[in-house]
Amino acid sequence: MINDVERILISEAQLAERIKELGAQITADYAGKEILAIGVLRGAVVFMADLTRAIKVPVAIDFMAVSSYGAGTDSSGVVRILKDLDENIEGRHLLIVEDIIDSGLTLTYLLENLKSRKPASIKLCTLLNKPERRKAEVQIDYNGFTVPDYFVVGYGLDFAEKYRNLPFIGILKPEVYK
Ligand SMILES: O=P(O)(O)OC[C@H]1O[C@H](OP(=O)(O)OP(=O)(O)O)[C@H](O)[C@@H]1O
Ligand code: HPA
Ligand SMILES: [Mg+2]
């Protein structure tokens, strides 16, 4: 598995450091409020687990599963809901937690969908932002790292369901996906 990685882009220590900062910022911004963190399955699971523990106001968690990538490295553009929320979100402060915003198509769809259910507020926290590939504009409230246009894996991010359990963000060798 590790042999498929060309190089480490963001180390375990850099991830931990940045997530501490994001947690502190979110804690300050939501003082006196309760958050409903919505993790986007499956990529956001690892980040969600670390981020929520870095937030010091009450956090409830829920998950939604959508898919647009299948087994490739390009978004199909067609977003499907595979699992909806369990919670009623009306009147609640939502914090959407994503691993990466790439084309922006997944989040654009998700934001519209969630807004129609009348939450009190919606903010977006993404670990990675890849602006070079954007097809739909997305407003990001909290961004961990801006990354160049490489297909990255690890820390929740997969290629064809592999590499999610790598503890760092790495760039895959091109021969792995070509
Ligand atoms: O901005 P976009 O181009 O829409 O890409 C970002 C989305 O794509 C990936 O999910 P994927 O559909 O691969 O599912 P996964 O989280 O289970 O890997 C990633 O986790 C984001 O949710
Ligand atoms: O660079 C990426 N890596 C893994 N999954 C992704 N989904 C969108 N972009 C990426
Ligand atoms: Mg994926």
Image: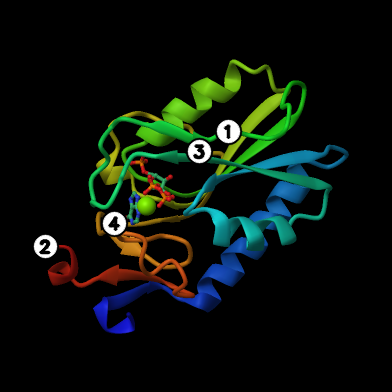
Residue at left offset 47%, top offset 62%: 156
Look at discs 2 and 3 and give the one toward the viewer.
Answer: 2
Determine which residue is flagged by label 4.
148
Q: Which mark is residue 140?
A: 3
Could you classify mark 1 by the number of other residues whose Cα lies within 10 Å: few (under 14), some (14-19), or many (20 or more)?
Answer: few
**Visible in this render: residue 142?**
no
Among the two numbered marks 4 and 1 on one chain, the one whose residue lies closer to the N terminus: 1
**Visible in this render: residue 87?**
yes
| Residue 10 quadrant | bottom left
Could you classify mark 2 by the number of other residues whose Cα lies within 10 Å: few (under 14), some (14-19), or many (20 or more)?
Answer: few
Among the two numbered marks 3 and 1 on one chain, the one whose residue lies closer to the N terminus: 1
Residue 75 at what x, y percent from top left? 27, 41
Quick one: 128 or 166, which is closer to the camera? 166
Q: Residue lying at the far bottom in this picture: please name it.
A: 3
Could you tell me which secondary element the residue under label 3 belongs to?
loop
Determine which residue is flagged by label 1.
84
Residue type beneath disc 2: Lys
Q: Which mark is residue 178?
A: 2
Q: Residue lying at the far front in this picture: please name it.
A: 82
Disc 1 and disc 2 in contact, CB within 8 angstroms:
no
Could you classify mark 4 by the number of other residues whose Cα lies within 10 Å: few (under 14), some (14-19), or many (20 or more)?
Answer: some
Among the two numbered marks 4 and 3 on one chain, the one whose residue lies closer to the N terminus: 3
Look at discs 4 and 1 and give the one toward the viewer.
Answer: 1
For residue 135, side relative to residue 122 (left or right)? left
